[in-house]
């Protein structure tokens, strides 16, 4: 039988992953990507001597004992890659000068919290107990187990934390933090995840710290784009083909079957199966013209909150920040408006633990903050205003940093501002969203129940993957969803799903 063909829209981490597993399983695949490089949101960019990173602060699955590690091994993404593990993830400066440090070592964190707030001993004990429970959780690779054995493995991974997970997924960080008497802890905990919605679930906070405590999550030296480029190289080595500067304008459908894609330039490509790893909203409502939706999907896209739009202000500075905390959340002496959004605090991160980001003795600083998509969209209509607005926010951030780190202004060598429109332009994500759906306690239940459906009602030979299907906003979920879809496709074709590591060890391959 001739090889079946698959067309994939988007060379982000999900699309590249699907492509790799398609090739491993004997399908002939091609990827169409609107940008000139792979990675989508998982990206970095060079400005003079500096590299600014737009994504990964930590990646899960760095410990060989974990299931996610298998995913990276199958894709060959760990070869020659080293990781930085944070001792402290973020430092939070209170308005009164007191400091809460989110240490990644749970014992140290416990001691620090007890010293800071002895009156909160009982709540701290509850928090620390939950963290220790979560260190026993095993994140699955198989997002939707298709066989009893996989379901059993998933169950075994969750079993030690089943009750804590069921409990903590419904408790928001904000609710929990309110139980602390100490105002610093009350304010700091909900700010641990930037851009978290008010009902951001405790379960994600607990999982993240637990992963870091065990060195199961770290920062990949070399940054996000390198990881994406390695995945793209792997895909090409497996025989796949990537078409860059190829924006898909329409998914071709005949008799309710996806049969190919039409690009913006009018050229058409046909295949047996189409997978969209692109933005969910544009896939459903533009590329498919809203023809394959039901009430449930409409409600998702009308009602569920989407991740906030953000501004990223990156600076290359002639100053060594290696002795500063990797991330610092500090109060501003006076609130500032960046665009039209009021900020009372800023979070500044440095990358001095990664020598590939800046020349020796110099540093990259990065400030991510909430932004209003509509404001930036209206500015974009007038290029001069847009440029001026970007310049203004850069200067405001530099002023704020200069007040916190005196003399910084003179050390700034390179400035770069990415707005929600930048995210939209380079990744086509809906309203410049930086992470698909916002993570809420409700969404947590959805994730634990297997995410959103990969197929649309009434449309055959078509699948969706990536961050709009697997809410979570992280690289491993997007990559795992690319793997997951190929398992489904193999199952539909009644053939075993194989991975390259299996093929290499297989007696059928010499
Ligand atoms: C500021 C920030 C911080 C983050 N921090 C972390 C972190 O610490 N750890 C972590 O694991 N993850 C982090 N992430 C999340 C991670 O980067 C994303 O979850 C992941 O990269 C999403 O991958 P994806 O393939 O699902 O989607 P995308 O990256 O959005 O990929 C979609 C791709 O499709 C392409 N495309 C869209 N429409 C079309 C079209 N019509 N035709 C052709 N191509 C199209 C886009 O150009 C893009 O390449 C962060 C992200 C951001 C922005």
Image: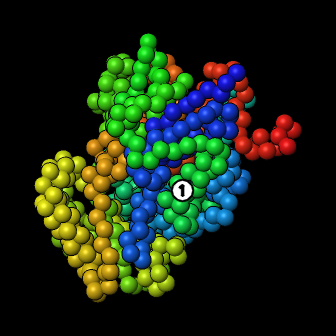
How many numbered marks have been drawn onto this rendered protein structure? 1
Image spot of residue 491 (x, y percent): 65, 23
Left or right position of 312 against 470: left
Left or right position of 284 against 78: left
Image spot of residue 122 (x, y percent): 49, 56
Relative depth, front residue between 273 and 78: 273
Residue 328 showing in the rendered view: no
Q: Is mark 1 within 8 Å of ligand 1?
A: no
Q: Name the residue carrying label 1.
A: 229
In the rendered image of this protein, does residue 266 appear above or below residue 495? Answer: below
Image spot of residue 48 (x, y percent): 38, 75
Quarter of the figure with residue 25:
top right
- Judge the density around disc 1: few (<14), some (14-19), many (≥20) Cα neighbours within 10 Å: some
Q: Quadrant of the N terminus?
A: top right
Quarter of the figure with residue 482:
top right
Q: Residue at x 30, y 54 (%)?
A: 422
Relative depth, front residue between 251 and 506: 251
Image spot of residue 409 (x, y percent): 27, 82
Q: Residue at x 82, y 40 (%)?
A: 509
In the rendered image of this protein, does residue 214 appear above or below residue 364? Answer: above
Quarter of the figure with residue 161:
top right
Q: Residue at x 30, y 72 (%)?
A: 415
Q: Could you say whether the residue bearing mark 1 is in a helix, strand or loop? A: helix
Q: Quadrant of the C terminus?
A: top right
Q: Residue at x 71, y 24 (%)?
A: 495
The type of colouring in the image is: rainbow
Left or right position of 390 against 99: left
- Looking at this rendering, what residue extends furthest in the top direction? 255
Relative depth, front residue between 44 and 148: 44
Residue 50 showing in the rendered view: yes
């Amino acid at each position: 039988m001739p090889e079946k063909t698959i067309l994939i829209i988007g060379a982000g981490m999900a699309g590249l992953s699907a492509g790799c597993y398609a090739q491993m399983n004997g399908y002939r695949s091609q990827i169409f990507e609107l940008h000139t490089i792979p990675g989508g949101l998982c990206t970095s960019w060079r400005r003079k001597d500096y590299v600014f990173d737009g994504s990964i602060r930590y990646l899960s699955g760095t410990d060989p004992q974990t299931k996610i590690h298998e995913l990276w091994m199958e894709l060959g993404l760990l070869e020659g890659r080293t990781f930085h593990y944070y001792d402290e993830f973020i430092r939070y400066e209170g308005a009164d000068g007191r400091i809460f440090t989110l240490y990644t070592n749970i014992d140290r964190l416990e001691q620090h919290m007890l010293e800071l707030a002895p009156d909160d001993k009982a709540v701290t004990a509850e928090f620390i107990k939950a963290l220790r429970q979560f260190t026993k959780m095993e994140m699955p690779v198989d997002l939707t187990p298709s066989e009893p054995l996989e379901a059993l493995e998933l169950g075994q991974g969750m079993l030690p934390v089943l009750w804590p997970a069921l409990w903590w997924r419904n408790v928001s960080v904000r609710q929990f933090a309110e139980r602390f008497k100490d105002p610093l802890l009350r304010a700091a905990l909900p700010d641990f995840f930037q851009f978290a919605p008010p009902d951001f679930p405790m379960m994600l906070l607990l999982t993240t710290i637990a992963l870091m405590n065990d060195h199961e999550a770290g920062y990949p030296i070399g940054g996000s784009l390198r990881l994406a480029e390695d995945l793209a190289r792997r895909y090409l080595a497996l025989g796949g083909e990537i078409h860059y500067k190829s924006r898909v304008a329409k998914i071709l459908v005949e008799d309710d079957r996806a049969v190919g894609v039409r690009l913006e330039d009018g050229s058409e490509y046909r295949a047996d199966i189409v997978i969209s790893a692109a933005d969910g909203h544009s896939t459903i409502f533009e590329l498919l013209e809203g023809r394959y939706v039901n009430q449930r999907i409409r409600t998702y896209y009308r009602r569920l909150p989407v991740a906030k739009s953000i501004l990223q202000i990156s600076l290359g500075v002639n100053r060594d920040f290696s002795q500063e905390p990797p991330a610092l959340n500090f109060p501003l002496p006076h609130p500032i408006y960046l665009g039209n959004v009021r900020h009372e605090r800023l979070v500044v991160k440095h990358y001095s633990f990664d020598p590939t980001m800046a020349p020796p003795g110099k540093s990259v600083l990065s400030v991510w903050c909430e932004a209003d998509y509509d404001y930036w969209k209206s500015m974009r209509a007038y290029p001069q205003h847009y440029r001026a607005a970007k310049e203004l926010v850069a200067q405001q951030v530099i002023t704020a940093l200069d007040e916190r780190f005196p003399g910084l202004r003179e050390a700034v060598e390179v400035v770069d501002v990415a707005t929600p429109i930048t995210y939209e332009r380079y990744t086509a994500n809906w309203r410049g969203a930086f992470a698909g759906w916002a993570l809420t306690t409700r969404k947590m239940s959805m994730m634990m129940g297997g995410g959103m459906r990969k197929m649309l009602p009434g449309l055959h030979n078509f699948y969706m993957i990536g961050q709009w299907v697997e809410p979570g906003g992280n690289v491993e979920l997007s990559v795992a969803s690319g793997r997951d879809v190929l398992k489904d496709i193999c199952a539909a074709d009644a053939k075993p799903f194989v991975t390259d590591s299996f093929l290499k060890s297989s007696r059928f391959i010499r």
